[in-house]
Amino acid sequence: MSASQRITAGIILFLTIAPGVSQAQGYNTSFELYNKTFNLYIDSSIVLRDSIELTEDYIHRSYQHLNKSNYGPVLDSLTNYKEKHDLNDWLYYQLIRKTAEAISPKKDNYERYTFYKWFLMVKSGYDARLTIANNRIIFYVYNNEEIADIPFIMFKNKKYMCLNYHDYEHANLNDAPTYDMIGIPEAKRAFSYKVTRMPDFKPENYKEKKIEFSYKHRAYHFNIKLNPEVDAIFRNYPGVDFESYFNIPLTKETYSSLIPLLKKNVIGMGQKKGVDYLMNFTRYAFLYQNDEDNFGKEKRLSPEETLFSKYSDCDDRVALFFYLVKEIYNVPMIALLYPTHITMAVQFDKPVGDPILYNGKVYSICEPTPQKDDLSMGKISAKLKDLTYQVVYSYQPVKFDYDK
């Protein structure tokens, strides 16, 4: 019996046309996305109507059906929005998820919803793959970055990350696929998890959070604007490499409510004292709790999530501290990873405390996470002093030659 003839037991697709939709025409739908209403025209030809068991043959036949359909208006709406708003791949995938949900709701038929996500991804040019394993439809995408926390599979010497891992509540998806990894030849683009630009949310959707801390016996107060939708963007975001993680930006409204005020507060302090101020802000303006107690698992928060969250740990503080120092002083920095801790070191004209040597330059430890002792700039915790560390990220500001 061939692979296309075998049937995976227990997975039945009920592919019925949406209620009230004529087979001769389409329908309009819309949903809220970031800062505007996203409008879609769904031609009836792209609505799957068959009722069939899930097999490799089904995937191929359904693809052929949609490939001949009038899917162009949907794809044009997606790609035009992506280009207009300069969406990174991760944010574009969130748009595709919402679009698939609008065409075929996830709760009505998960397999059909996943198929639409895959179809829209491959038609957008991404090397995405569908397969069947352990009575589940599994959705992969080609990625050549260092990604943790989610399963991957090697196929034809390329690494494919599982995009629907979280839908199975972290079940073991390492079983060998029952069928081939199904893709289309013209879809070759690698998917990137880098987020270098956040959406422009509606200002009225922000909420204010009061933050305060003391520095040199003076109290500082902040009313930071934060958007709850940021949490949804990063809810299933995996562990990316440190360069990608540290360079996730703030949204425009949050940036405007925090960075100018911090810049104002450090005026006249000088660079070292200003960095010390930012170190103490990151260390003491937020409550500490490790990820296991807070989330039940390891989870790195973006700078904006750290501002929003009640609790945060060393990864979160280091990312926030790096972002603040980069935006305000833009000086060289390195991230030091210890077996159970991560911290940051900053390069000054004259080092402070115990020197950290890296690539011929001298850096000073700036610990942004609360420790047993109130560590001054240049000091490392006694429990880490004799441990080996790894420099996992080195930031060197770009210098422009304006005479050219």
Image (tube, helix red, strand yellow):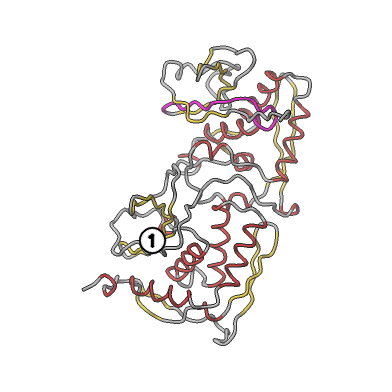
Q: Image quadrant of residue 366? A: top right
Q: Nearer the viewer, residue 113 or 227?
A: 113
**Callout 1 environment at 10 Å: few (<14), some (14 to 19), or many (20+)?**
many
**Left or right: where 307 falls relative to 64:** right
Residue shown at 66%/63% (left/top)?
32
Q: Position of residue 282 (x, y in %)?
A: 63, 30
Q: Nearer the viewer, residue 167 or 21?
A: 21
Out of 320 and 190, give the one closest to the viewer.
190
Q: Is residue 314 above or below residue 197?
A: above
For the C terminus, the quadrant is: top right
Mark 1 is on which residue type? Ile
**Residue 171: x %, y % from top left:** 36, 55
Kindly indicate the quadrant of the structure image that contains residue 389. Answer: top left
Residue at the spot of label 1: 138
Question: At 63% from the left edge and 17% from the top edge, which residue is drawn?
Answer: 348
Mark 1 element type: strand
Residue located 62% across and 79% down the image: 27
Where's the N terminus, which quadrant? bottom left
Q: Could you tell whether 361 is left or right of 13 in the image?
A: right
Q: Position of residue 165 (x, y in %)?
A: 42, 55
Q: Is residue 70 left or right of residue 274?
A: left
Q: Which residues are magenta?
A: 325-339
Residue lying at the far left in this picture: please name it: 1
The image shows residue 8 at horizontal and vertical percentages of 30, 70
Task: Say if the magenta span includes residue 328.
Answer: yes
Q: Examine the structure image and report whether residue 49 is included in the region drawn in magenta.
A: no
327 or 269: nearer the viewer: 327
| Residue drawn 52% across the image and 21% down it | 372
